Image (cartoon, rainbow, N blue to C red):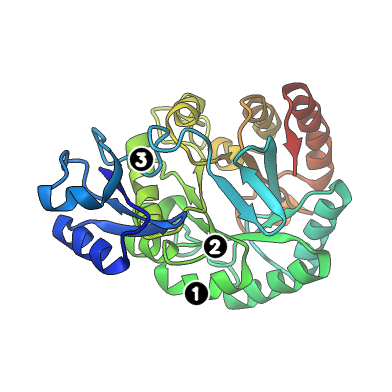
Amino acid sequence: MIIHLKNDVDKQIADTIASDLNAFLLYKDGKYVIVTSSHIKEIQENHQAYVDTFLNFDHDIQLSSRKYLQGTREIKIGDVIVGGCTNNTLLITGPCSVESREQIEQSAQLLKSLGLSTLRAGTFKSRTSPYSFQGMGSEGLKLLDEIRVKYSLKIITEVFDSSQLDEVADHADIIQISAKSMYNQASLKKCGKLNKAVLLKRSFGATLQELLQASEFILSAGNDQVMLCERGIRTFETKTRFTLDLCGVAWLKQNSNLPIVLDPSHAMGYAYGIPDLSRACMAMGVDGLMIESHPDPARAKSDVHQQLTHPAFIKLYGSLKAIADVIGRKIV
């Protein structure tokens, strides 16, 4: 249940009601909002005088539901806006990992040449094997920060442990929760306390219900700047890395109020398939696309096979822009 209290209800009373219901207390648009378990269906008699409106739910997809907010939430990333009343599609590109100053500077120059705003690159890498490149860590973050200032770009980079969040938040404009960390509730709750955009990636074994409930950990802690990322799920198929769930994306667009970003690179796992998948994603009118690119993919320290060369990305961008023009969207 989501309960909107009357405008004149003070914090002491709101705290008392939230405590009585073992619920979350938020302050939005000049009034207190209480979010309880969906199992609660009725307002207690001693609380009724303080309640303006309330809404019941059949499940714990509440703050992220279009039943609660019919429109898509607006995400502000500096001067870039995603969702809301815009028709913007945020096109994010860059390498899987920061590897050197030269590599990340070349990536920044690619974005600037196309008028794009947001550079992706990992510094703390959650890898399947302990012998794989784990990222440059703090040194990589500092490089990203320098590039952000020099080229006036937005930076998105991932965390997979709550202990990294404060440091990453100081250097990034968007915090990416990796697919392997979608169930890390400590990180999700801590993101909820930050005034920072968060990209929550769907775990390859997660249902749509589980993805949205993970987003509720962030939303219920007070941060409504949340975007969802579909990056492929594990199915019976073995010829591709994962299966990009476009059916799931259609369901999310219908039922969730959170902006949706697609990551075809991690779904396909091979560069040859990324352009076609990216065009399909753009045709769905999604709020964002994240595509890996690298100055020299053959020499990359991670995700060698799925990163596009810069010429290949430039060619893809041309076709994505044509699709965006047809469906009335603007690439930012």
Direction from residue 125 to residue 291 in the image, left or right: right
Give the camera-side residue of 120 and 57.
57
Q: Is residue 104 above or below residue 330?
A: below
From the top left corner, tell me how far across and down residue 15 is, in percent.
25, 65
38 above or below 70? below
Where, by quadrant of the figure, is residue 284 drawn?
top right
Viewer-nearest residue: 294 or 280: 280
Q: Is residue 48 left or right of residue 252?
A: left
Residue 82 falls in image quadrant: top right
Residue drawn at 80 percent across, 52 percent down: 111
What's the amino acid at mark 3? Ala
Instruction: Classify residue 40 as left or right of residue 233.
Output: left
Residue assigned mark 3: 206
Crowdedness near tag 1: few (<14), some (14–19) or many (≥20) residues, C-alpha within 10 Å: few
Compared across the picture, whether 84 is left or right of 111 comes to left
Residue at figure coordinates x 51%, y 43% from the top left: 229
Q: Residues within 10 Å of mark 2 (few under 14, many from 20)?
A: many
Where is 203 relative to 165, above or below? above
Badge 3 element? loop
Residue at 74% of width from left, 67% of height from top?
A: 148
Query: Reading the chain from its start, which is encountered first: label 3 or label 1?
Result: 1
The residue that disc 2 covers is 196
Looking at numbered disc 1 in the image, what kind of residue is underneath it?
Answer: Asp
The quadrant holding residue 193 is bottom left
- Answer yes or no: is residue 305 visible: no
Q: CA distance from mark 3 to mark 1?
A: 26 Å
Q: Which residue occupies 48% across, 66% down?
A: 194
Compute the Cα span from label 1 to label 2: 11 Å
Q: Which residue is mark 1?
A: 166
Q: Secondary structure at mark 1?
A: helix
Q: Position of residue 23 (x, y in %)?
A: 23, 56
